[in-house]
Amino acid sequence: MPVMTTTGTPDVTVTVIVHNDAERLPRAVESVRRQTHRDLEIVISDDHSTDDTPQVAQALAALDPRIRYLRLPENSGGCSAPRNRALEIARAPYLMFLDSDDELPAESVASLLAAHRERDIDFAMGAVRRIRVDTGRRSTWMPHLVRERRTLDGIEADPRLFFEHLATGKMYARAFLDRYDLRFPEGIHYEDQLFSAQAYCLAKRFTVVPEPVYLWYVAPYAGSAAASISNQRHLLTNVRDRIHVQRLIDAFLAESGHEALREDKDHKFLKHDFRMYAGDLPYRDEEWLDTFADLVNPYLATLSPGAYARLPRAERVVLQLIRDRRLPEARLAARGLGHAVAPRQVATDADGRTYWGEHVPRSADARRELDLTDLDLDTRPFFGARFRHEITELGRGPGACVDLTVRTYDPALRLPVGPQRASLLVSPGRHRLTVPFRLSPVRPGVFEGRVRLDPATARLPVSGFAGVRHPLVVLTCRGQGNRGILLAPLAFPPSTARVPHHGGASPHLLTVEPEGHTPGRLQLRWEPVGLTAAVLRPVVRLLDRPRVRRTARLVASALR
């Protein structure tokens, strides 16, 4: 790879921050070296790593005169200090930041620099592509915000951009950062949120480009030692840190004359930050929930009523149950987030209004937030009626079989008295597996039934099937059908069985498990083995690019 050497000022400085990541650092640096815009410098800012990172960084610097290695004298415990120290030595008029476990697409620098050269702007930002390291699945972060090219005269033109709070995926004018002495806040977590809020509010003009400019590798199931700060939501210190940075943002908005943006920023907190904790609530024990409520409730009380009003009803229900310290019910409500799941019970007042839970709420705020009347639970068409299906017992049968006890809650009493016709529906590929069973009444509004599900009997496409499916419960009443998700037990060990492919091709491994780390559905996962696997397995491996292999060989050679 030809290397450009320059004695003048580079156009762009890309800072790669790293801590104990010797394995992935070459990949990140290589992604900067292969940029189509060549006139740049690369600063590797090492937050005092204790692994082989220093040797790897020095070897990389020996390969390319554009690379400079900076090592902090002690570990700062965050991203801010290594970025700020690199800012002190950066020589270019435009600056970008890259984490050592991520990459830049080849046109990133060129795309963002072109936006700066077209207009006098304070920063340019582009699309961030998220890549799941476990599945390779790609998606765009906040795609609706970066769908089209546009230049905005301040954040007021589109306050939704508060949701795009990453400091990466952007190119900043050095003059802009220096004009406001804008640096990353040190000694706190979620520093990107405060830095980005300040940048948005202080910028007079910035440009959004739709091209991908950052590859963000996401490891959702990393061990606790390797998990990112955002994936450590089980720690109550994580909750404290997130609320602390929100209070700092609120103070900045007030002091800088941007108080009018408070509702938009509050909505972002409720819809994004709090929503992540809400999805995890079913896994938390009573002691954790109690402390969580202690931490969040004082801050929730300061948020704009308009921010709450903009949320979906299901999220408002969880929030209100937390604020009312009805914590077991909050955990129950959180299981249905995103899936239109009914509560187990509803209560009706003298005016005929329907509320979440067993009792009519006492306070006006609670009545407003827990009011489910507009869902029309008792009158909507049967195909759209809301029920709640939970697995109360799960047993293992032979092979891939599972024996399920399913409890169905019908809080609006839509089903007639007596046994109900039901079935489990699974559709791998284009084929369906339907397993009928009967739900018997337990008490008014509650039914229960037992069913054996053998997913190995599902027909698969001739070419085999690699993917995940979630069984649905289908209710049939008076000739009409209703489909709903099946909530799995919160914790049960996955089981994997080798099953034949009835189409005649290679067998599959079939896993029955709860759905990832979300407290939701029963999940079935097919993975082909043998010849079928060879056909379906992705042939492109992200870590097997020729240039990355070449860089790795050069680094290994330099270290010998």
Image: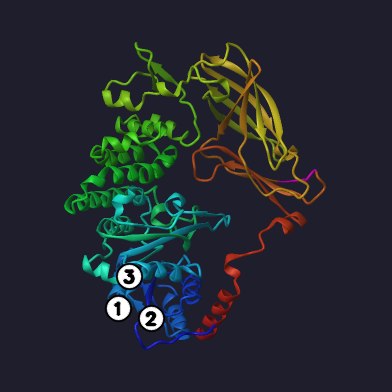
Amino acid at circle 1: Ile
Amino acid at circle 3: Pro
Judge whether residue 409 can be spotted in this image: yes
Location of residue 340 with respect to 273 vertically, above or below: above
In the image, which is nearer the foreground, mark 1 or mark 3? 1
Amino acid at circle 2: Arg
Which one is nearer the viewer's eye here, 170 or 343? 170
Q: Residue at x 26, y 65 (%)?
A: 183
Q: Residue at x 31, y 69 (%)?
A: 173
Q: Earlier in the sequence, mark 1 or mark 3?
A: 3
Q: Which residue is mark 1?
A: 89
Callout 1 crowding tier (Cα within 10 Å): few <14, some 14–19, many ≥20: few
Which stretch is magenta?
498-502
Tell me the chief SS of the magenta region.
Answer: loop
Residue 87 location, quadrant:
bottom left
Q: Are marks 1 and 2 in contact (CB under 8 Å)?
A: yes
Location of residue 304 with respect to 550 vertically, above or below: above
Q: Which residue is mark 2?
A: 68
Q: Position of residue 419 (x, y in %)?
A: 62, 15
Secondary structure beneath label 2 = strand
Q: Position of residue 490 (x, y in %)?
A: 51, 37
Q: Which residue is mark 3?
A: 82
Task: Quote the CA–CA distance across marks 1 and 2.
Answer: 10 Å
Most extreme residue toward the front is 118
Secondary structure beneath label 1 = helix
Task: Quote the CA–CA distance across marks 1 and 3.
Answer: 11 Å
Which one is nearer the viewer's eye here, 226 or 395? 226
Question: Is residue 314 covered in magenta?
Answer: no
Callout 3 crowding tier (Cα within 10 Å): few <14, some 14–19, many ≥20: many
Residue 266 location, quadrant:
top left
**Which disc number belongs to residue 464?**
none
Q: Position of residue 135 (x, y in %)?
A: 58, 55
